[in-house]
Image: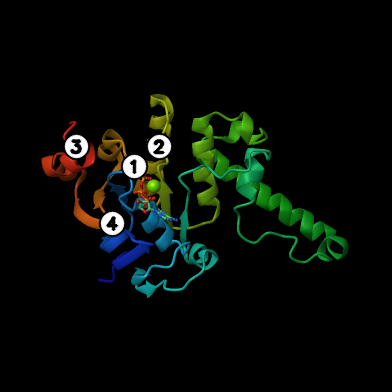
Amino acid sequence: MTPYLQASAVEVSFGGLRALNDCSFTIQQGHITCLVGPNGAGKTTIFNVITGFLKPNSGSVTFKGQPLDGWKPQAIVAAGIARTFQNLRLFVDLTAVDNVLASLPGQTGEEPLAAIFRPFHVAAAQRRRREEALAILDRVGLSARSGDFVRNLSYGEQKLLIIARVLATGAELLLLDEPASGLSSGALEDVMALLRSLRNDGKTLLVVEHNTRVVQKIADDVLFLHQGHLMAQGSPETIVNDPALAEIYFGGAI
Ligand SMILES: Nc1ncnc2c1ncn2[C@@H]1O[C@H](COP(=O)(O)OP(=O)(O)OP(=O)(O)O)[C@@H](O)[C@H]1O
Ligand SMILES: [Mg+2]
């Protein structure tokens, strides 16, 4: 069977530093796969490779059997893979709904004369896009905040808005870089419930996560990356309870 997403022998060097070293793994469609590993293990770097932000020195990534080599980030989003960034990257001076609108594909404005010659058509299209953006905000539990400026949202609400923005792309595979980091326990529960419900809706998720409690609650599979290499793969119980991995991760602190 063709793997859903497969990384094969991916190598990335920054000068003398090998950020990814013969990095290979597959992820399964319909699963939440958590990507764990110590700081600097290469987690964000493999996201950058998968999403076309970084060209590997060698190795390749295939999505549903198709190699993504040399594809631009936009083409990869169009193929169905969207990602969030470790830092928030929201437009803080725009409203929540406008942030989602900016991620919806097919922006109007590409035909500048349409607004003059077909004003009703353009207005209707904009209304539909706005309704779509509002529905996505509702999906992540932010409908009450749609008209609020992002700078006035709580940190937890901003983390939910980031997820709304990847949903707006329509992608089926979502790569989330630390979606739960820095959250208080209530906001953490909201994000975990949202991720599980997206999985139940048929999305596939690859999630970078440091909190082992979160990993145990949401993951179907876990990938453990160490020094740019896949060191272990398994169920959350197997990975979290492996003393050798805990030693690498926490220096024996648990
Ligand atoms: N653009 C870059 N230039 C030089 N070195 C880089 C660059 N990006 C990442 N690195 C280095 O590559 C290694 C892997 O970094 P990466 O950001 O992928 O780690 P990570 O697993 O995401 O860590 P964290 O858990 O801290 O987010 C690190 O040593 C990092 O310093
Ligand atoms: Mg990172």
Q: Is residue 101 above or below residue 187?
A: below
Q: Which residue occupies the extreme front position in the image?
A: 16
Q: Is residue 15 above or below residue 96?
A: below
Q: CA distance from mark 1 to mark 4?
A: 16 Å
- 10 Å neighbourhood of mark 1: few (<14), some, or many (≥20)? many
The residue at the point 77 percent across, 66 percent down is 111
Quarter occupied by residue 115: bottom right
Discs 1, 2 touching: Cβ within 8 Å: yes
Sort mark 4 into few (<14), some (14-19) or many (20+) by Cα contacts within 10 Å: many
Report the Cα–Cα distance between label 2 and label 4.
Answer: 23 Å
Circles 2 and 4: CB atoms closer than 8 Å: no
Which residue carries the number 4 mark?
228
Work out whether 74 lies above or below 236.
Answer: below
Q: Are marks 1 and 4 in contact (CB under 8 Å)?
A: no
Identify the secondary structure beneath mark 2.
loop
Q: Amino acid at mark 4?
A: Gly
| Of callouts 2 and 3, the N-terminal one | 2
- Position in image of residue 173 (x %, y %): 41, 57
Q: Which residue is mark 3?
A: 251
